[in-house]
Image (cartoon, rainbow, N blue to C red):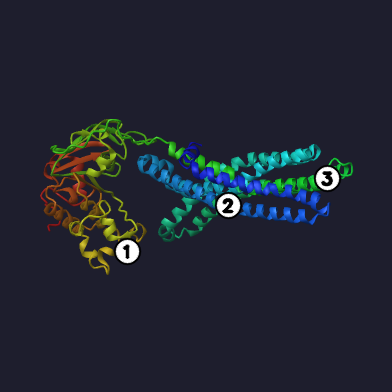
Amino acid sequence: MKLVKKFLREHFALVSGTMILLLIQLTATLYIPYLVAHIVDDGILANDLNTIYSLGFEMLIVAIIGVIAAVACSYYSSVIATRFGTDLRLQVFHKVQVLSVKDVEDYGTSSLVSRITSDVVNIQQVVVMLFQMILPGPLIGIVCVIMSFMISPTLGWVALISILVFLGAAILVTKLAVPYMNAIQHYLDRMILVLREFFVGVRIIRAFDNSEFERQRTDKTFEEHAENMIKINRLFAFLSPIAYALLGLSMVAILWFGLIEVPSGILQLGEVTAVIEYTTLTILTLIMAALVIVMIPRALAALSRVDTLLAIEPGVLDSQTVHPLTHGSNDIVRFEHVFFGYEGEDGDALVDVSFFVPKGQTTAIIGATGSGKSTIAKLIMRFHDATNGRILFQDSDVQSISQHALRDAVSYIPQKSFLFSGTVQENIKFHKPNGSNTAMRQAAQTAQAASFIESLEKQYDAEVVRGGMNFSGGQKQRISIARALYKDADLYVFDDSFSALDYKTDAVLRKALKEDMPEATYLIIAQRVSTIMNADQIIVMDKGHVVGIGTHASLMQTSDIYRQFAQSQHIFDDMEEPLNV
């Protein structure tokens, strides 16, 4: 409800104006039966044509005012819903931007997509219906009951009892439907997840001829969602028959008591007509409200899900006293007795890790899968925070530097390359869209991407489809490296980024890095010894521990693990880099 209160404060004038239009619409609607009663009593029964014309013209004016107010109310209620939805989406988007990697992984992509799309749509629909159908029901009901009691207490009780019975049934049905409404969001998340996996993994599914299994899995997911929706619709299907039954019974009761009170002079025929119209209007309005009231529990569940996401405290936060990033240190990065473990995993991923990355040099990290290499890169970027120990960047603790400043100073190339839909130029200039084309071409040249980019028909303006699916793995990786090199950074982190490149391109690219950016600082994480054997410093990882630090030559003499790595890749003591370029 905090979200609703905040929105009401920020858009008080718009909401208030819409409420006024709604009241004008309802006043016009409720004034019509009053005029009908007078036309019957003072015009038709009195055989007075002037009164009939006068009241008829007044009724026409009131109806026109009501229509104008209804159209305006409908328009502005849509504006309110759209703005509320826009605000929610912006808040969710900005929240996800500050969440840690672990937070995003805990929620899951499908759940986050569901919250920012279907959940917000459900909320928007209810906001529109709130002004058009839901609010008018109770307001009309209250006024109609009061007017009925003013005309005749007996007939007023008939209207009140009918309304209370219907409201009781609606509340009971809604209460029974709430658990199913809450569950529907879970099924929707599951459905999005299954569909996403199917579309992303369609090649693997076909390669393993597993289409039948996927069909059964998707069918089961769809059926669970459908069964839950059917249960909800069955519950709310009772409301319309109940409403129409009450409408029929109330009409009989009003006519019965009216037949008694009109001849005795207690009531006039027009007043009975007015009560009939008030009761009919109330129940029909409540029927319309009942048709959309099914959406309220679902919208409340959606609002709760969005509110829960917005209320979560990010796992990685900036310090309350953020220090500016300094420059000039001899060591770009320094790990001091760092420990780190992933939540839910047995043991630590990093154990008492200490090393430094000297400025202007190439530091490499090598180790088997699961040795903690990529974890080091994630800690430098503050995707996670260390459990114990300190990580210094330019002599400042990374937890005392703002995440924005830290990540602005580091250029990171992940193992799995990702390209955004757009053009090649937009991808390379991702960090600085208005940067120079000369710098872009130089970055592409260094990354060994210029040759294939310039062979394309539109060259740097060539289209990149979603995820870069129109490029090979090596081409995507080279564009990703060009994107990183285009950014001026204190440190360039290659997280196994050369794995998708062939040996020749790998060697040529590393040679270009030395020639084109000789003073840059590199941290290269790799499994290929040939990729890192010429590094100024090599760090050997094994099961989260640093088990060796030195050059290729020294490690071949002192580190059994490194020597085994090298020999398994046919690199021996007396060999230089396999491919000289």
Q: Quadrant of residue 504?
A: bottom left
- Secondary structure state at the residue bearing disc 1: strand
Quadrant of the frame with the C terminus: bottom left
Residue, disc 3: 268
Disc on the earlier residue, 1 or 3: 3
Question: In the drawing, does residue 18 fall left or right of residue 467?
Answer: right
Q: Residues within 10 Å of mark 3 (few under 14, many from 20)?
A: some
Label 3 or label 2, whichever lies nearer to me, is 3
Secondary structure under tag 2 reads helix
Location of residue 37 in the rendering, given as x and y in whole percent from the top left corner: 77, 48
Tell me the SS state at disc 3. Answer: loop
Pair 2/1: label in front: 1
Q: Where 393 sits versus 200, above or below?
A: above
Residue 165 versus residue 534: which sits nearer the camera? 165
* Amino acid type indicated by mark 2: Glu
- Tally the marks: 3
Disc 2 marks which residue?
A: 223
Is any part of residue 342 visible from this angle?
yes
